[in-house]
Amino acid sequence: MSEYKVYITRKNSEDRLKEYDINEICTDSKSNDRISVDTREKFQKILGFGGAITESSAYVLEKYKDKNKILKDYFDEKDGLGYNFTRVHINSCDFSLDNYSYVDENDESLNSFSLDNAEKYVLPILREVKDIRNEDLSILASPWSPPKYMKTNDDMNNGGKIKDNYKELWAKYYVRYIEEMEKKGFNIWGVTVQNEPAAIQVWDSCEYTAEEERDFIKYFLGPEFEKSNLNDKKIIIWDHNRDLVYDRAKVVLDDKEANQYVWGTGIHWYVSEEFENSSKVHNDYPDKHLIFTEGCQEGGVHIGSWKTGERYGRNIIGDLNNYVEAWIDWNIVLDETGGPNHVGNLCDSPIIIENNSNVIYNSSFYYIAHFSKFIKKDSIRVLSKSDIDKVHCLACINNGVATVVIMNENEEDKTVNLNIDGEEISIKVTKNSIYTIIK
């Protein structure tokens, strides 16, 4: 038998990424339940994993005595989750302490542009992360809302649209942001056009129809990037839920002029787990890319919940099995309320810091780790199939090493015949567990 390494996290036990000898999980029992892996059939390259550094996350971290340890738990390549992506917000978002933009009200020239608000909390944390990563950090930046004077509702919150006469200035705003971040030592990997453009939120938000997003890219954002020699920066469309991703992407990508500026499409997990919609986008536009840009457990904190971790595991497997190349979680850290959030939209995060002192690692932290610690940048997804209800699998290879993640969402143990390139072993996969098997 080949050499295997096995790491397990399971409910109702102390096992959190615990390493086991393969013989400890092998069984002589036979089963018709099968998982098969064929490393000869290859798909997309994996770019990596990450989490968002919002103002709220940065604020909570700055109040904690050992923030560097938590950042290493996420971003350290050897001892942490190995995150190599992060997402930041352009202007404020709901997970900010208040509404703000980077310019003075009614500034028609952007001469007042300043990242002072970002310097309060976000950028100091981002510097620490960059040091931990030894510069190997891909930063995705997303706007939630333009400054209120550029919008039809004169409000950064509650939806509204960008005024026609401000579309050019708003496109220049992205460029200015990228340039000012560069001056501070931060290389922006890419931008999304708009966070959740189909939603009218009570927090920072801005509406775009698919046609409006297409035309903004075609006539304003794309040309401004080109004029400013920013063609290496990725422009990502949609940045919203999977349910409408194909229809939204089609409108933009069927337009040749807009298409030339677009690197790929971003998705969120709210509303839908229609993972196959990402494959539809890939199949029709195989030269474009897909990344997951946001997901979190809504409704405040869920300390002790195992369902949260299982939601993460199910979604990461479903997304990567449908051509998603990078997977970025939402807030890396929140406080015991699931905030702060300036409109009370409280959520969960993989790490919660209670009362600035007690650190809680939720099940989601460990479920993410089963992917991000082992499926390294530039790994290639390969064919994997499970014929077992609520037992999900994902397989990748890197430098000839196969990594297989198996997640049992059932309330009962399963005996699984695992076949990797013709070598078959029978293993016991315990209930409510996730295994990473390296061969």
Image (cartoon, helix red, strand yellow):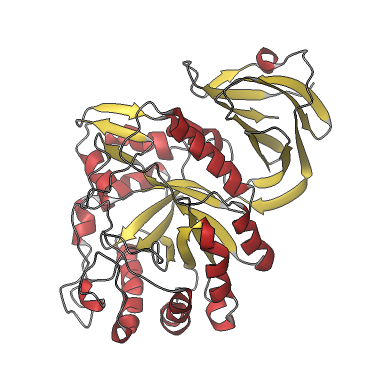
Res 132 seen here: yes
Task: Give the camera-side residue of 309 and 389.
Answer: 389
Spot occupied by residue 408 in the image (x, y as percentages of width and height) = 60, 28
Q: Residue furthest right?
A: 422
* Residue at screen point 66% across, 13% down: 24
Asked which quadrant contains residue 355, the reply is: top left
- Residue at point 36%, 43% (across, down): 298
Q: Position of residue 377 (x, y in %)?
A: 57, 47
The quarter of the picture where the N terminus appears is: top right
**Residue found farthest to the left:** 105
Which residue is found at the position 60% from the left and 58% from the top? Answer: 277
Is 39 on the left or on the right of 392, as rendered?
right
| Up-down relation of residue 18 to residue 301 (above or below) | above
- Tell me where residue 299 sits by quadrant: top left
Q: Is residue 423 left or right of residue 127?
A: right
Hey, which quadrant is residue 184 in on the image?
A: bottom left
